[in-house]
């Protein structure tokens, strides 16, 4: 695939945005994978694939439509590897993240198409792709908020299902992306409040208090956040000095270097908050929490309104896709929020915002009967609580980091043997 080199002047803000939106590869070890191969793609993909598919046309109407859709998506992703920006990541290869961006554009366009259809049309399209959905009704979902007073080991263990491990793994990945305890815990607690607020619309949100507060917040979410932040500390302490695979003499070393291609090229210490941040930083982080919660809500509303099982490929595929899109999105948003040289958000961040808003509009349009039962006071209370709690947590984090920094500075200035071993360890870890 081609590695496009953005034409940027490193002395202005446009160059900084260019590096955030289309980060170039500085050190190329295998030039073949970073040189343009448009002729190869034209002859190999266009001629071979297109001709072979078109010659297989038959009288089966559904098969022809299915192959046509796959062909359109395939060639759109080919174009995305050649024309779309790299994004903020270069590992394992910029072309991978161009494809992710291309898939996100396809998903956004699909949502816009769905937005102008009727509910019955959408259901028929879903049944055409997945006939098994016609046998599922949303009231068949597992109920978590029954017999809450019956607290036994067997009952608690019964709630430790695949979704509990999904919570743990999901929050570990979220911590790897956000890399800030305070923001992660704010989103975690606010999500449990969100479930309580919207439980009158989504019965699946009804949980026992011990399930929500202990199993979800403390065990699954808490352990996932801890593991994710532990991985962040590990990557921060690593030394990133990459050697060209061509200069490695042994075959074992070459294989090891090839595997390490799937690890980060570098690891940036993220600092969402600092003592000098403005009120706009507070607003931006509050907006981050809001979009995060709306994205999670969209998952459950789409599943409920269109009656899709939790483990269905449509639900799982959307979650995986959103997870891939969020990685470059969050990095671009972080640069926009914290770096004054970055005057606009990245392209992937813009597309993700459009996806979130479009999903929300789809939920409202096709769930009018559901939202007609919404308690407006609950929604307003939820919004007020979210902003107050978010700003309170962020203010506490700034206060904590400010005091910790002043303590470190004081210990560093003294740098005497009388300083406690704990303080010395803090100073050493921050050098």
Image: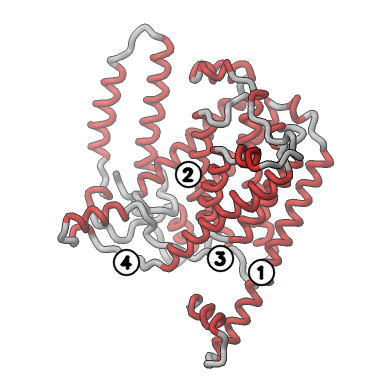
Q: Earlier in the sequence, mark 1 or mark 3?
A: 3
Q: Name which residue lies at 55% across and 56% down.
A: 178
Query: Which numbered tag is attached to residue 241?
Result: 4
Residue corresponding to mark 1: 398
Disc 2, SS: helix
Kindly report the distance in space between the C-alpha atoms of the residues bearing marks 4 and 3.
23 Å
In front here: 358 or 146? 146
Query: Which numbered tag is attached to residue 324?
Result: 2
Q: Residue furthest right?
A: 377
Q: Is any part of residue 358 visible from this angle?
A: no
Q: Earlier in the sequence, mark 4 or mark 3?
A: 4
Disc 1, SS: helix
**Side of 10 where 107 appears, left or right:** right
Kindly report the distance in space between the C-alpha atoms of the residues bearing marks 3 and 2.
22 Å
- Coloring applied to the structure: secondary structure
Mark 3 burial class by Cα count in 10 Å: few <14, some 14-19, many 20+: few
Q: Earlier in the sequence, mark 3 or mark 2?
A: 3
Q: Earlier in the sequence, mark 4 or mark 1?
A: 4
Disc 3, SS: loop
Kindly report the distance in space between the C-alpha atoms of the residues bearing marks 2 and 4.
26 Å
């Amino acid at each position: 695939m081609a590695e496009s080199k953005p034409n940027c002047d490193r002395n202005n803000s446009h160059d900084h945005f260019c590096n955030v939106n289309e980060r170039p590869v500085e050190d190329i070890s295998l030039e073949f994978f970073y040189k343009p191969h448009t002729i190869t793609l034209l002859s190999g993909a266009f001629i071979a694939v297109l001709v072979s598919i078109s010659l297989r046309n038959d009288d089966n109407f559904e098969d022809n439509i299915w192959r046509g859709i796959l062909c359109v998506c395939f060639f759109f992703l080919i174009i995305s590897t050649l024309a779309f920006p790299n994004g903020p990541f270069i590992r394992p290869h910029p072309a991978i993240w161009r494809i992710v961006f291309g898939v996100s554009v396809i998903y956004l366009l699909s949502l816009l198409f769905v937005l102008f259809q009727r509910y019955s049309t959408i259901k028929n399209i879903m049944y055409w792709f997945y006939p098994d959905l016609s046998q599922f009704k949303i009231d068949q979902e597992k109920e978590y908020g029954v017999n809450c007073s019956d607290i036994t080991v067997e009952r608690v263990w019964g709630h430790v299902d695949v979704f509990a491990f999904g919570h743990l793994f999901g929050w570990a990945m979220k911590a790897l992306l956000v890399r800030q305890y305070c923001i992660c815990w704010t989103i975690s607690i606010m999500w449990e409040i969100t479930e309580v607020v919207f439980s009158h619309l989504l019965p699946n949100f009804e949980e026992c208090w011990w399930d929500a507060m202990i199993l979800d917040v403390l065990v699954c979410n808490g352990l996932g956040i801890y593991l994710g932040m532990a991985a962040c500390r590990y990557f921060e302490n690593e030394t990133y000095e990459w050697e060209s695979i061509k200069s490695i003499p042994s075959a074992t070393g070459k294989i090891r270097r090839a595997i390490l291609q799937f690890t980060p090229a570098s690891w940036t210490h993220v600092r969402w908050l600092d003592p000098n941040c403005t009120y706009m930083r507070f607003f931006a982080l509050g907006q981050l929490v809001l979009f995060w919660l709306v994205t999670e809500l969209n998952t459950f509303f789409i599943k409920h309104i269109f009656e899709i099982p939790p483990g269905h490929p449509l639900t799982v595929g959307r979650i995986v896709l959103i997870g891939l899109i969020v990685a470059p999105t969050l990095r671009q948003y972080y640069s926009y929020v914290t770096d004054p040289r970055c005057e606009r958000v990245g392209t992937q961040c813009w597309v993700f915002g459009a996806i979130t808003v479009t999903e929300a509009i789809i939920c409202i349009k096709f769930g009018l009967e559901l939202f007609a039962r919404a308690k407006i006071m609950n929604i307003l209370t939820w919004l007020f609580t979210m902003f107050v709690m978010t700003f309170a947590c962020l203010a506490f984090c700034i206060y904590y980091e400010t005091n910790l920094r002043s303590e470190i500075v004081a210990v560093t200035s003294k740098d005497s043997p009388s300083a406690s071993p704990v303080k010395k360890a803090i100073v050493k870890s921050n050098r």
